[in-house]
Image: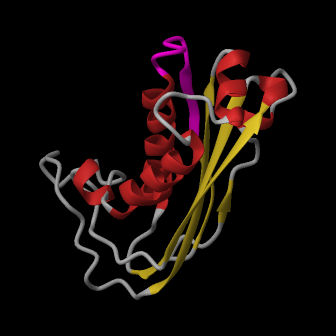
Amino acid sequence: MSELSHLDARGRAHMVDVGEKPVTERVCVARGAVRMAPDTLERIAQGSVPKGDVLATARLAGIQASKRTDEWIPLCHSLPLDGVEVELLPEPSKSRVRIQAIASAHARTGVEMEALVAVAAAGLTIYDMCKAVDRGMVVEAIHLVSKRGGKSGTWERPDDPLCSTED
């Protein structure tokens, strides 16, 4: 159980004490996508979805959710984020919207969850805004791309599920 920092010696979940860790710059990149019918993607691009500007709303939802990650994920610390960027890229050839979030902070713990939550919230917002025209959408492949900072240093994913040649 010692390898899982969120479990105490008795195997119970607890919040990790990061008070003694140094403050360092932390930056994480996460990605995901929402796969949909080609007509749905076209309606998003044309701005003809009844609920309004899907991409602008999803971008704001991702930023807002990232700032409230500790309310989504029970054992996350509240972090004063330096910045959150959410980019949504329609990919007609793959009939999807690709989502990327970058979260940054000067903190004692990483911002992986903040970046991942931003992607998840943006994807779920796209689903919510378009479900009246396409209930078959799939929010998929939410993953960490890279992280920088802290004791463990830099980590980069060797493969990106959204860039596979099988798509």
Please name whichever residue, 115 or 134, is drawn nearer the observer in this view of the structure. 134
Q: Can residue 166 be seen in this view?
A: yes
Q: Which of 63 and 11 is in front in this view?
A: 63
Please say if 141 is above or below 166: below
Residue at point 38%, 79% (across, down):
108
Which residue occupies 64% across, 32% down?
44
Quadrant of res 94: top right
Q: Is residue 140 magenta?
A: yes
Q: Count the labels in the image.
A: 0
Q: What span is colored magenta in the figure? A: 131-143
Q: Where is residue 14 in the image (x, y as percent from the top left)?
A: 16, 56
Q: Please state the horizontal and vertical placement of residue 61, each as a whole percent of the image.
A: 43, 50
With 59 as the anchor, is 166 left or right in this view? right
> Hey, which quadrant is residue 153 in on the image?
bottom right
Q: In the picture shown, does residue 111 fall above or below 25?
A: above
Q: In this view, does 108 lie above or below 74?
A: below
Measuring 70% from the left and 16% from the top, which residue is drawn there?
A: 39
Task: Give the camera-side residue of 73 and 64.
Answer: 64
The C terminus, quarter of image = top right
Magenta stretch encompasses residue 71: no
Query: Looking at the image, which residue sits at the far top?
Result: 136
Residue 165 lies left or right of residue 84; in this view the side is right
User: Relative to 26, is 130 above or below?
Assistant: above
Q: Can residue 143 be seen in this view?
A: no
Left or right of residue 73, residue 160 in this image? right
Image spot of residue 66 (x, y percent): 40, 58
Expressed as whole percent of the image width and height from the top left, the position of residue 1 reads: 28, 47
Q: Which of 8 and 154 is in front in this view?
A: 154
Q: Residue at x 27, y 66 (%)?
A: 77
